[in-house]
Image: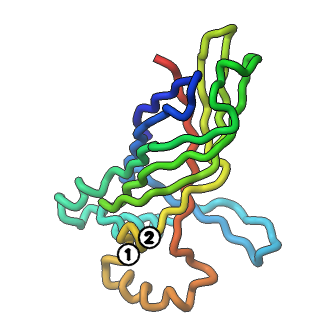
Amino acid sequence: LTGEVFIDPADLSKSTGLIKADLLKLELFQQKRDDEKADYGERTKSDKQNEHARTWLEISPDAPEEARKANAMSEFKLTKLESDHKDVTKLTGDSRKVTGTLTGELRVHGRKVERSAKFEATFAYQGDKLTKVTVKTTEPLKVSLEEHDIKPRDAFGSLAQKTLGDLAGKVSNHAPVQIELVLTPK
């Protein structure tokens, strides 16, 4: 991830930012469970699953170069931040936590969609000086495959898409994305 986030600790509602993710570095992992009440098993990585994901996103080596360049980066543009404490400077202590909702424009595969998620932010202070801000979503952003035109683009994938209705209980049409950032003031 790369990007810049602008935070005014005296008025969090003025916060803005742009976070970019290089999808060429994306790696998918999977955890399975026997049923809804069971614990998830060990995280495993499937090279084939990652290959299919790159094909669906049109960033695989066999995708046209123009498409690869256009789809390699995804972005989240923070447009609104609502929190339980608007002014962090009025809180006390070396560690000051706020919670709220962040809203922004999520661009994946050339498609922009507004998304919101709950977050928690911890502001680390040394005296009156802000030294670090840690922000993490407490619920995932849901990336809709359909809204972002993420779909099978090879022969196997096209055949698999026809059976997705049969797999609805096992395969989601949304990808949950968690965000965790550590920000250092300039």
Q: Is residue 167 left or right of residue 32?
A: left
Element at label 2:
loop
Label 1 crowd bin: few (<14), some (14–19), many (20+), radius 10 Å: some
Q: Nearer the viewer, residue 78 or 124?
A: 78
**Residue placed at 55% from the left, 36% from the top?**
181
Q: Nearer the viewer, mark 1 or mark 2?
A: 2
Which residue is the extreme one toward the top? 127
Q: CA distance from mark 1 to mark 2?
A: 7 Å
Left/right of residue 57 with respect to residue 43 in the rendered view: left
Q: Residue at x 75, y 18 (%)?
A: 92
- Horizontal and vertical percent position of residue 106: 42, 54
- Residue 122 image offset from top left, x and y in percent: 67, 30
The disc labelled 1 sits on which kind of residue? Lys
Earlier residue among tags 1 and 2:
2
Q: Are marks 1 and 2 in contact (CB under 8 Å)?
A: yes
**30 vs 181: above or below:** below
Viewer-nearest residue: 59 or 181: 181
Q: What's under tag 2, amino acid-wise?
A: Leu
- Which residue is the site of mark 2? 145
Q: Residue at x 66, y 16 (%)?
A: 125
Picture residue at 44% right of the left edge, 41% below the top: 1
Which residue corresponds to mark 1?
151
Q: Is residue 48 left or right of residue 94?
A: left
Q: Secondary structure at mark 1?
A: loop
